[in-house]
Amino acid sequence: MPSKKVPQEIDVSIVVPTLNEEKNIEACIAALRNQDFEGTFEIIIADGPSTDATRKLAQKLADKVATETRKGIALERQAGGKIAEGKIIAFTDCDSRAPRDWVRRIHETFQHDPALGLIYGPVFYSDVSAQEQYLSTLFMPRFLQLTSILGMHNPIGSNIAIRKEVFEKIGGFNTNYITCEDLDLGKRAQKHGKLHYVKNIHQFVSARRVRKWGYLRYIGFHLYNGVRFHLTGKASEKYEDVRE
């Protein structure tokens, strides 16, 4: 009798939350498929109540599709994380354009330190002027490095990776949060493993919210909201979704 095929273990699951992202999903997944990584990984689209062609494209392009009937990026990330089979779960956004070494660097970082529970890195803009790009690559890493030294870690949801066992132990994302669900995930993950900022694991995303809000409003909101969360555990319950 022929032996049964043993399913291959998955090293990394990549979860991408979506909501009406038909304009971005193909480029996002293309960048993820183009990873310079010799291990195994799966791409999971976690779709909210999209009304465009996002889900149809996801079923064609992704390895798995999780669906969520309610709006909320924490809900979408949670839905994707729950069906992830990888030993590591990496989260990014659908407007991201992942560098070719993104998955490899994430996997290597966890391999080198078994005590790590969650890691995160800087996020830069992919669709801005050269000057804006330079400023984001200059200030973002320094800000994240400083806050990590102060013990006020600021994981950004579009560039987070967590061990699956830790994700399961803490129950994943707290879907009651409208904002700061990524900071909350990091704070709870610390109880089961080290939380670490890794400057050389970066991600590129669209500046669409900055263009809509303006830099002053954008920076001011996130600084205030992040500090407020670390000091009080409370976060803004209002955050307009620019994905629609």
Image (tube, rainbow, N blue to C red):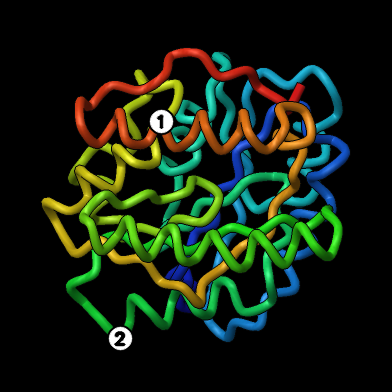
User: 118 or 207: nearer the eye?
Assistant: 207
Q: Residue sitting at 30 percent across and 86 percent down?
A: 112
Q: Seen in the image, is 16 located left or right of residue 155?
A: right
The C terminus, quarter of image: top right
Q: Going from the N terminus, do you reach mark 2 or mark 1 first?
A: 2
- Residue 227 is drawn in which quadrant? top left
Q: Where does label 1 land, which residue?
A: 224
User: 164 or 4: nearer the eye?
Assistant: 164
Q: Seen in the image, is 46 located left or right of residue 168?
A: right
Q: Residue sitting at 68 percent across and 38 percent down?
A: 215
Q: Find the residue positioned furthest to the left.
A: 191
Q: Residue sitting at 20 percent across and 41 percent down?
A: 170
Residue 66 in picture, x, y percent from top left: 57, 35
Residue 46 in picture, x, y percent from top left: 59, 36
**Residue 145 in the image: above or below residue 232:** below
Mark 1, other Cα within 10 Å: few <14 / some 14–19 / many ≥20: few
- Three-letter amino acid code at disc 1? Tyr
Count every numbered label the image shows and give the total.
2
Mark 2, other Cα within 10 Å: few <14 / some 14–19 / many ≥20: few
Q: Where does label 2 land, which residue?
A: 112
- Residue 49 is drawn in which quadrant? top right
- Three-letter amino acid code at disc 2? His
Q: Seen in the image, is 141 located left or right of residue 38?
A: left
**Residue 162 in the image: above or below residue 156:** below
Distance from label 2 to label 1 (Cα)? 35 Å
Q: Residue sitting at 40 percent across and 51 percent down?
A: 155
User: 229 or 64: nearer the eye?
Assistant: 229
Residue 201 in picture, x, y percent from top left: 51, 72
